[in-house]
Image (cartoon, grey):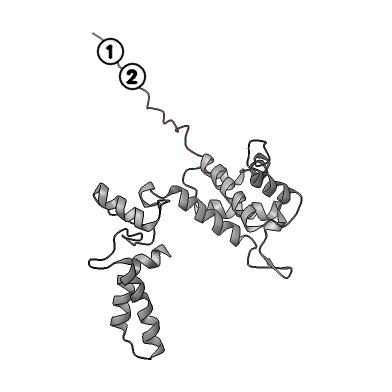
Amino acid sequence: MTPTIVSPPPPATSVTPLTSSPANWHLSFDVGKCISAMLLPHQPLQTQQAAKQLLDGIAISIAHRGELVRHLADDILKVCKTPSRAHLNVIAEKMVTVYSKLKDEIDGCVVGHGFTSIYNQLENRISYLKRPISTQRKSVPLKRRLEMDQEEKQTKTTVRDGYGCVDFLPLMFPDGETEDSLIDKQKQPQYMFSQHNHSNDDISSLMASTYILQRQD
């Protein structure tokens, strides 16, 4: 009796998720399309003005530049959820190449590569959009945040930011301290330096105890 030969099943074909981005997406990223979208009727007036001035070759204000960076960052994240610095570097260079008024210049001389400023703004904006919701500053006064924290008695979650600080936005004053007492302590280092009478230990202690006010400022 001739044995039956069973063929092994074909190897599974790997499928790339639809949500993944092409490896070279940044090379084909259309900065002009992003600026044109800012001119659409449903966009705020300030957004439309920023795009129009850029297209007309007019130097834009800081506020309009912020609008530009916000929209550009949103479009980048729609294409790639985790853009690298190399990606942003290429897109920033495209922006200053197409729109020369964004180039870093002093008295007509190009500073560095000419696109460092727009690159830094893009990186900061994307880092802000991607940071955890729990670390974002609540849009209420400091005293009210303290009251809310005490009322809710929520369990404090340890958060680590990109620089390694585990408590970069404290909500509670140190034990035994009030806002007025911490304001007084902020003035002490100035007085000590004016009198040439201070020590590193004293300064470090005062800086640590008034850290919450420094962050608030």
- Give the mark toward the camera: 2 or 1: 2
Look at the magenta stretch and give its main secondary structure: loop
Segment tinted magenta in the rendering: 7-24
Residue in the image at 55% along x and 47% along y: 73
Residue nearest the viewer, comparing 22 with 36: 36
The three-letter code of the residue at mark 2 reads Ser
- State the image coordinates of residue 83 (x, y, percent, origin top left): 50, 48
CA distance separating discs 2 and 1: 10 Å
Residue 18 is a magenta residue = yes
Marks 2 & 1, CB-CB < 8 Å contact: no
Residue nearest the viewer, comparing 55 with 153: 153
Residue in the image at 38% along x and 91% along y: 195
Return the residue at label 2: 7
From what the image shows, is residue 164 above or below residue 198? above
- State the image coordinates of residue 209 (x, y, percent, origin top left): 30, 71
Return the residue at label 1: 4
Identify the secondary structure beneath mark 1. loop
Identify the secondary structure beneath mark 2. loop
Total numbered labels: 2
Question: Looking at the rendering, which quadrant does residue 15 occupy?
Answer: top left
Q: Is residue 80 left or right of residue 203?
A: right
